[in-house]
């Protein structure tokens, strides 16, 4: 923006005008004072012409011997330099004309005195003295005019100086102080973070208008930067809040999974916690061996899915429904990884417990075989010896021995079935698969119809 009217130049012009007026007023007063230095002398000399005119009339009639001297003195007074200076352009014409009339009328009066025509001179003296009086009055008015001129010029100068000073003050207040106050107010708004400050209006195209436009542009850029930073900080804050919520949920879930032994109710508690904190409609863990759920499924809702994997082997699937915004992908992937590892550990624990159970049953079967089977074999041998030792005609004894033999055979049969049951091999670690495998094995050895009813939650047993 071009500065067409500088504030400094405007104030300098006003101050220069004030100084110039002061100099003009002072100079006019000094010139008038200098020109008035000999005004009193001129008035005195003009007044003395009147007295000298009467004295020469006296000399002509009473003291003729002094007439020549007084004539020379009168001529000297009339030709005085201070009176001759009245013939200047700036001297009022009335004064100059009356002085010239006095000089023009004097030769005739002088001639009358020199010729001794006293009567004619005395008749002309009152007229001449009247002309002198008018000349003296003109000199007095001329002097008064100069005093009035000095007073008027001083008054006009003072009024003009005061007016210029007031105009300068008003100009300074309107064009300097007010814009500066507006800039101070705007800077305080900006300092407090409020960029909606009052508009900076400067009508004159001066430095303050340039400064106001520059400040407004700077404030607008600062506002845009401030909004950009606010949006960045807001986004970072939201990211940190989301990250904190994610970490908190994952930490709580990890604590729930590690604080107590793994069981189905614990997995359902974790799913319920995720459902509540992420405002989901439903969430499920599905597999061929297990199924955990929380919330109510929506028939029209869309399921989102993530596989549960451990060592690149899929062991299940995490599914969820949401009515609003979907949870962050990172959260659900981390949760799926955590749940997948927990389920893998849970299945490994079940398999380990099953192996312990199989080992224990094998030990029991071996001990039963070593003890009961040997005892039953010994009893059968003893029974055979007893049958041989008893008389063939003793039917009662043979009846008892036959009953005992039948009971011993039944005991053998039951022992074999018990050993077969204990020695069943269960390869699956999951309870459902293990029960199904065991039932299939038993079904092959029995004609009875076996039904298996499984309910979620019985795995903890």
Image: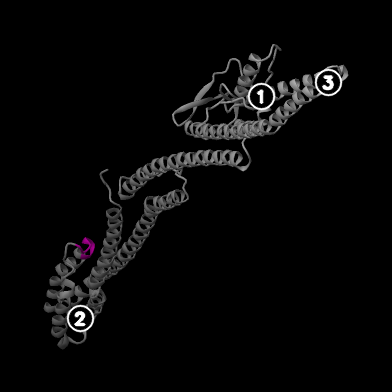
Relative side of 17 to 179, left or right: left
The local crowd at label 3, few if under 14, some if 14 to 19, many if 20 or more residues have their Cα within 10 Å, is: few
Against 205, is 43 above or below?
Answer: below
Density class for disc 2 (Cα within 10 Å; few <14, some 14-19, many ≥20) is many
Quadrant of residue 84 within the rendered picture:
bottom left
The numbered mark at residue 56 is 2
Tell me the tag on residue 391.
3
Q: In this rendering, would 282 be left or right of 327?
A: right
- In this view, the residue in front, 150 or 333, is 333
Magenta span covers which residues? Answer: 90-95
Marks counted in the figure total: 3
Can residue 240 be seen in this snapshot? yes
Q: Is residue 407 above or below residue 449?
A: below
* Residue 48 falls in image quadrant: bottom left
- Which of 142/218 is in front? 218
What is the distance, in whole Å, between disc 3 and disc 2 at their CAs? 224 Å
Q: Which residue is at 15% across, 88% downward? A: 65
Residue positioned 84% across, 18% down in the render: 399
Which residue lies under the disc numbered 1? 421
């Amino acid at each position: 923006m071009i500065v067409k009217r500088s504030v400094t130049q405007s104030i300098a012009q006003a101050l220069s005008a004030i100084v110039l007026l002061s100099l003009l007023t002072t100079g006019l007063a000094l010139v008038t004072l200098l020109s008035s230095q000999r005004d009193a002398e001129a008035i005195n000399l003009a007044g003395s012409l009147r007295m000298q005119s009467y004295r020469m009339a006296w000399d002509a009639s009473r003291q003729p011997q002094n007439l020549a001297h007084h004539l020379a003195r009168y001529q000297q007074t009339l030709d005085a330099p201070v009176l001759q200076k009245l013939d200047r352009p700036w001297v009022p014409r009335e004064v100059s004309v009356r002085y010239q009339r006095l000089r023009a009328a004097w030769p005739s009066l002088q001639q009358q005195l020199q010729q001794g025509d006293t009567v004619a001179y005395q008749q002309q003296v009152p007229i001449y003295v009247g002309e002198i009086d008018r000349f003296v009055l003109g000199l007095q008015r001329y002097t008064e005019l100069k005093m009035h001129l000095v007073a008027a010029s001083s008054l006009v100068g003072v009024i003009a100086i005061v007016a210029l000073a007031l105009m300068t003050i008003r100009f300074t207040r309107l064009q300097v102080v007010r814009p500066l106050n507006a800039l101070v107010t705007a800077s305080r708004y900006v300092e407090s973070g409020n960029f909606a400050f009052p508009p900076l209006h400067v009508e004159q195209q001066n430095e303050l208008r340039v400064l106001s436009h520059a400040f407004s542009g700077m404030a607008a850029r600062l506002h845009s930067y401030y909004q950009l930073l606010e949006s960045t900080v807001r986004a970072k804050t939201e990211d940190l809040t989301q990250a904190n919520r994610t970490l908190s949920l994952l930490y709580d879930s990890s604590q729930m999974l590690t604080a107590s032994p793994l069981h189905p109710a614990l997995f359902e508690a974790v799913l319920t916690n995720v459902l509540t904190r992420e405002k989901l409609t439903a969430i499920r863990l599905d597999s061929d061996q297990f199924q955990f759920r929380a919330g109510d499924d929506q028939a029209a809702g869309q399921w989102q899915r993530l596989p549960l994997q451990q060592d690149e082997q899929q062991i299940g699937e995490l599914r969820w429904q949401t009515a609003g915004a979907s949870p962050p992908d990172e959260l659900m992937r981390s949760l799926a990884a955590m749940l997948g590892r927990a389920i893998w550990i849970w299945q490994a624990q079940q398999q380990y417990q099953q192996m312990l159970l199989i080992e224990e049953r094998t030990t029991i079967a071996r001990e039963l075989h070593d003890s009961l089977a040997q005892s039953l074999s010994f009893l059968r041998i003893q029974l055979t010896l007893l049958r041989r030792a008893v008389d063939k005609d003793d039917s009662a004894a043979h009846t008892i021995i036959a009953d005992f033999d039948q009971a011993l055979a039944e005991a053998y049969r039951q022992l074999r079935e018990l050993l077969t049951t204990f020695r069943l091999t269960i390869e699956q670690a999951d309870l459902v698969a293990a029960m199904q495998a065991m039932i299939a094995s038993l079904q092959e050895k029995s004609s009875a119809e076996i039904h298996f009813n499984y309910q979620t939650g019985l795995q903890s047993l």
